[in-house]
Image: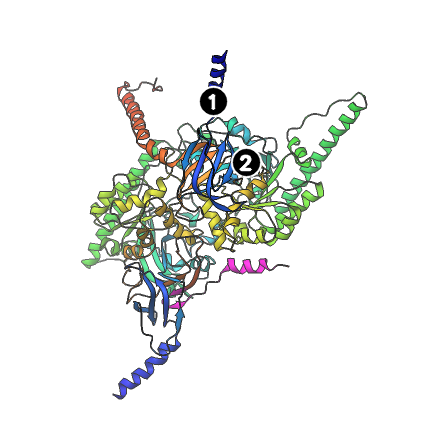
Amino acid sequence: MKSILVSCAFAASLLAAPPIVIQNATILTVTKGTLNGSILIRDGKIVEVAEKIMAPADAKIVDATGQFVMPGIIDCHSHIAADSINEGSVSVSSMVGIEDVLNPEDIAIYRALAGGVTTANVLHGSANSIGGKCIVLKLRWGKDAHDMIFEGAMPGIKFALGENPKRAGNPTGQRVGAGNVPARYPATRMGVEDVIRQAFTDAKAYQQSWKDYQDKVARGEQALAPRRDLRLEPLVEVLEGKRFVHSHCYRADEILMLLRVADEFGFKIRTLQHVLEGYKVAKEIAEHGAGASTFSDWWAYKNEAFDAIPYNAAIMTRKGVVVSLNSDSAELMRHLNDEAAKTMKYGGLTETEALSLITINPAKQLAIDNRVGSIEAGKDADLTIYDKHPLSNFAKVEKVFIDGDLYFDRTSDLAQRQAHEIEKKKLVDKEKDQQRRAPAGAARRPAA
Amino acid sequence: MKSLALALLAAIPVLAGTDDTFLIRGATVHPVASAEIQNGSVMVRDGKIVGIGHNLAAPKGLRIIEGKGLHVYPGIIDSATQVGLSEVSSIRETNDTGELGKFDPQLRAEVAINPASEHIPVIRANGITTVITLPMAEGGGGRRGASSGIIGGQAALVHLDGWTWEEMDIKKSAGMTMRIPTIISPGGRFANADFPAEFGGGRFSFADSKKTYETELRELREFFEQARRYQKAKAANEKGFQTDLKFEAMLPVLERKQPLVVMAARERAIHDAVLFADQQKVNVIIADPKELGKMGPELKARNIPAILGPTLALPVRDDDPYDSTFTLPNDFFRAGVKFAFGTFNNQFVRNIPYQAATAVAFGLPYEEALKAVTLNAAQIWGVSDRIGSIEEGKWADLMVTDGDPLEAKTQVKQLYIKGKTVDLDNRHKRLYEKYLNRP
């Protein structure tokens, strides 16, 4: 009997990962100041953050002497880990979703991890006024698509305003409909508003038809259920506050248009994406309660980006908007810390405000700030360790933890490179060898 | 005696009155060509540096700029840009980056540089005083995907200050841009053999690509041969000789007075470029290499320098180390190949210091990173007698900062081009102030 208990206890200890203590680090909590000390992690959660922590006997110690720990970076606008981005054939594509095309083997995931990113809002593209459904991921590299999904995070939908939704079928610099594909409505910003208003008018009617049906059923009457509409369902979820709207936008006029359309139909815009002229209507954005997720300094790549300024994040922050910096790019995603540093130059944000743009603020925008975005007891142990202060352009990422598990470690990455080279050479040699042996004209077949 | 007195009298007002004569003192001076000087001074007369050191005695009446707490660096140089040739990259009408035609050596980027471009004040606000503007061999006035040229034209080295491109000029023809033909992987940049053609993959076969490569190489060699025949005919003053603008433009290249700036991304392309330089006996600068491979010793042996593109870029192949672009500058440094940085665009020129900083984070010595945006660039473009460092006799292209210019949080406080104070105001600052103060 006793031996069974012992073996049970032994088995349990095998199942639970040992606690981790990150020691001697400069800890940038973002929400609770900066301290030199330790972080205790147990079962994937931050248990304690303090100057001195008694490490449990079985704890795994991570010595971070001279290093800086910050919350894992959150990118509120990414297209990594998706096999396709745009269903651009129609102006309302709310029936499609990124969740169905996730590719957990996209190398961009690992590269983003190596840039300190732990969470990404993976969005549909901007080809249409109302795009597809979006999903929040934790970059648990090596796991399958399902296990990468940020459990419990509110799903989203992508909207897009301005030049991109105007362009499909209406090529730049040509008369509308002059391309070799049929023109697709809308071709103007007026039309973009119309598409969104029409879609929500339809969604309201659809919502009402279900309410009527449910009322009848509740009254015990005979009733025929409405036909399900997979295109309108996500829009009803938006109306009912069950799905977030993340809208691509540039110009002040179109930003204001969307806020007013949302007001008209009684829903909220959760985040304005890019929002390069957000600084012109920061007051209205703050009043609506929308978050703003922008670039640090991209500009002039298209006409609607010609009034983009690197002070955008700072002005909107000063005017009370919750602002984040996003990448929209597998490359930029690797150095969002550098992007945050630029807001100290352009507009004079403080270090904490700059770091908030890539941690707690995007967490708030995605309503996952109870889980991630700062280093506090009770939150997920999603942490990035840099060799220097992350707002220095000379800093590089050393380690990245998600849920307390080490997903990137520069030391092991370097150590594995030679083995990878040897493995690659073997594979290439084998392929070459098979090509040589194959008789001329013989059909090539995959290696056994 | 009288004439001497007159000369002195004449000299004093010039010293005191003009915009390009002053002394910065009490600053930390970073000459790049030599060790930094704490509490140092830089004396400028008529736009030229006439003294650097600890305690320079200021002639009476000289304008003094107090540099306490500030740092003085040479102005930053971006060795590959589209500045002045492009305003809004997606709008063809605002782009003059690449002409139609396969061989366009006669084209001069400088004459198409718009001195009123909104990009210029935005870029120089971050301490960039000088750029190389490249005509890219991309065709169609700047629309990528149009028929692609091989020789793009003459790159211009310009100051980011001046009412006209003539006033901006440092070197009208600093290099001849060229693309070395390459075998492009099937499917182009979406290279993936598993990707069906109807989805944009496998748009051409390897055999097609190889054929194009061989044809282009042959055309390129023929073009050089024709240029040489033209050179001989001209030298011999042959009867019936007629001026040809294309071949005329090739003469400085053939005479090794002007380098060929050869776009070569992959190791194989760099190899081909080196081979081409050997065969044609021309000077070459490798532009925008994405890898070095085994080409280090070959480049070093021939003193061939390189202009490195963005450090902050994605690795070329999926299975490259994640940091391969971050470590590339250090690869070049360790191979003993001289290099400078370039952004190869417009909108990120102001970020060239951070391209250098990332290379430092991944191994490049700090001093080398700073040189790659100053002195090395000046040397590669053959103008180190005038710019690239704070040395006596050079132009006073000076950047005054409150810290390390390779750090994003650092502010550029003052900027001088040829000793003249440069206005740091720009479109972005104006919009910032306007909308920050919106009621």
Q: On the same chain: label 2 and label 1?
A: yes
Q: What residue span does the magenta drawing correspond to?
A: B415-437
Tell me which label, 2 or 1, sits earlier in the chain: 1
Q: Position of residue A84 (x, y in %)?
A: 50, 32
Q: CA distance from mark 2 to mark 1?
A: 23 Å
Disc 2 is placed on an element classified as: loop
Residue sticking out furthest to the bottom: B2
Residue sticking out furthest to the left: B236
Q: Is residue B429 left or right of residue B344?
A: right
Compared with residue B145, is residue A445 higher up or lower down, i.e. above or below?
Answer: above
Q: Position of residue B360 (x, y in %)?
A: 35, 47
Instruction: List the residue tagged with mark 2.
Output: A379
Compared with residue A26, is residue B433 higher up or lower down, i.e. above or below?
Answer: below
* Residue type marked 1: Ser
Tell me which residue sits at (62%, 45%) in the image: A290
Compared with residue A48, is residue B424 higher up or lower down, i.e. above or below?
Answer: below
Q: Position of residue B364 (x, y in %)?
A: 32, 47
Compared with residue B114, is residue A197 higher up or lower down, i.e. above or below?
Answer: above
Q: Is B432 inside the magenta-drawn segment?
A: yes
Chain letter of disc 1 in the image: A
Chain letter of disc 2 in the image: A
Q: Is B306 inside the magenta-drawn segment?
A: no
Kindly indicate the quadrant of the structure image that contains residue A446.
top left
Disc 1 is placed on an element classified as: helix
* Residue type marked 2: Lys
Q: Is residue B320 visible?
A: no
Q: Is residue B22 left or right of residue A201?
A: left
Instruction: List the residue tagged with mark 1.
Output: A13
